[in-house]
Image (cartoon, grey):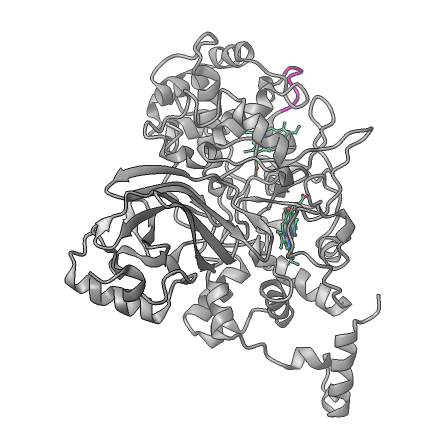
Amino acid sequence: MTFGFAERIARLVFLGAGLALLSGGPAAAVPIEFTDEEIARIASHGPWPPDWRGDPGNRASGNPAAIWLGQSLFFDARLSANGRVSCAACHRPRSGFQDGRLTARGLARGTRNTPGLLNVRHQRWFGWDGGHDSLWSASLRPILDPREMGGSAARGARLLKSSPSLACHYREAFGKPPSADDPDFLPNLAKAIAAWQETLVSPPTPFDRFREALADKDAAAAASYPQAARRGLRHFLGRGQCATCHAGPLFSNGEFGDIGVPFFVRPAGVDPGRQGGIKRLLSSPYNLLGAYNDDATRGNAVGTRHLRPEHRNFGEFKVPTLRNLTLTAPYMHNGSLASLRDVVRHYSELDEDRLHSDGERILKPLMLSAGEIDDLVAFLETLSPPAPPQPPLPPPGALPCPARR
Amino acid sequence: MKSYAKRYPLAGRRWRQGDGWSVLLLAIVGSVAASAFGACPPTVADGANLVRDGLQLAWRPVIGGSPIAATAIPMARHFAIEVQVCSGATPSGATLAGLDATMPEHRHGMNYRPRIVALGDGRFRAEGMMFHMSGRWQLEFEVQSAKGSSRLFDDVRVR
């Protein structure tokens, strides 16, 4: 890869000034200072973790018995039709709850990349197409989906009844015994699994510490943030306009966009993205407008109630969070980009013909130099913790249910 | 009483939020009139003031039941907008028939369709708004009165 024009000019200027004699090249010698405007925009990507007050739509949210039950079920392959596929088969704790495959493989091969589950409690829409409006309904889909786990209420109830400890925790969480005939049973299983996923929060990152140091005007604390990441951060906020969509503490506005990732699926077909997601959501008995939403005020259903389907939704996918990306390769809804460098190159060489004519106008090929690509990658890497967070402890199943608080 | 157009010589122009004279004039009027939301004519306390076709429209964003400044609308969060339409010192009898917002530079609008609830006395609330990206959003209020339909615009910058 050759250096971009701007960088070559910069090098010439520095050579002319005789400064390049100092090792490390020109950029490395210059500390990056941020303007007040930039510091304010950096501040908008925190604090970490953001405030969170439980899910009003899930009666099991924060309930210890439900969290225990949910954790057990997440790792239990007996929920699936062939007894071999658990949630954790695709959402592996060590990989940020992702599987490293291009597209998921359960009972059959899927067409979408498995998303990580760290910080999933902060999302508004679930699935690449936002086909679910709650964490619990997104957790129910894979249990029933014949391509993923192919389970059923009968299978779930059999599993719970076969285990005194699972049955006891179910009763403690929901106030009644598990029963396949109870219409609440499947939503309750999903609510317990959701309650557990709500505990998956990633630790603060080098970026978070830098952000805090800037806010505190603590130059010494800020100094450890790498120069390359600073330059990348500046591109991210400025020329790249990345923060227009990748906004806030999660680096996602929680909405949808079309950035020109192909949406054809083999052998012959298309993934309609958000357009299909809205249809799926509105036809589901488990959406927040339905009977299983535990928020009697329906105050949590504003988004669902006011959805506005548009032509442009075809081929739109959810703006993913940019936290923990070093754990969750490959990238995009179809896993088509293997590395962060490939992603940044995608934005650099964007094929405008591929973007919808009625789509987003802020995307332009960025034509980044090799150095600028390195810088953006360096910045993205600082949004992950230096080491993978500890996988959560296995459920302490040995404890008798009533002893658990 | 002087005609509206004489009292407000700039009326009929597209008034933008932050127009110094409008704010000053309305502040003076407001200091005389009662300042509770819903009293006519609107004051700065009622939010941003727009004037057109003999109508005065005040709007303010509301989150979780509390009014906030138009400059403080957070990105990618649902909010509501309270609107009050007056003609002079009385509620106008006009209805807020529509409210929408677009990002002219991006050539798209909101992902959500607001629903308008009439609160009585020329007051309305539009629920289910969301500005999902940073940048310039243009609000368009469609007001239906005896004289026909008027469109009033205002700009908001979301960070």
User: In this view of the protein, which residue sits in the foreground, A90 or B54?
Assistant: B54
A82 drawn magenta: yes
Compared across the picture, whether B98 is left or right of A105 comes to: left
User: In this view of the protein, which residue sits in the foreground, A313 or A386?
Assistant: A313
Image quarter of the N terminus of chain A = bottom right
User: Is residue A76 shown to the viewer in this render?
Assistant: no
Compared across the picture, whether A24 is left or right of A206 comes to: right
User: In this view of the protein, which residue sits in the foreground, A125 or A22?
Assistant: A125
User: Is residue B139 shown to the viewer in this render?
Assistant: yes
User: In this view of the protein, which residue sits in the foreground, B111 or B47?
Assistant: B47
Does residue A77 sit above or below A48 in this rendering? above
**Which of the 4 quarters of the picture holds residue B15?**
bottom left
Measuring from the top left, give residue A292's x and y in whole percent: 42, 21
Residue for point 50% across, 41% down: A123
A339 drawn magenta: no
Does residue A45 sit above or below A54 in this rendering? below
Q: Main secondary structure of the magenta part?
A: loop
Does residue A34 sit above or below A283 in this rendering? below
Measuring from the top left, give residue A366's x and y in whole percent: 72, 62
- How many numbered marks appear? 0
Taking the view exactly as shown, the residue that stands out farthest to the bottom is A17
Measuring from the top left, give residue B118's x and y in whole percent: 31, 37
Measuring from the top left, give residue A355's x and y in whole percent: 72, 48
Does residue A204 sit above or below A38 in this rendering? above
Image quarter of the C terminus of chain A = top left
Residue for point 56% across, 35% down: A309
Q: Which residues are magenta?
A: A81-85
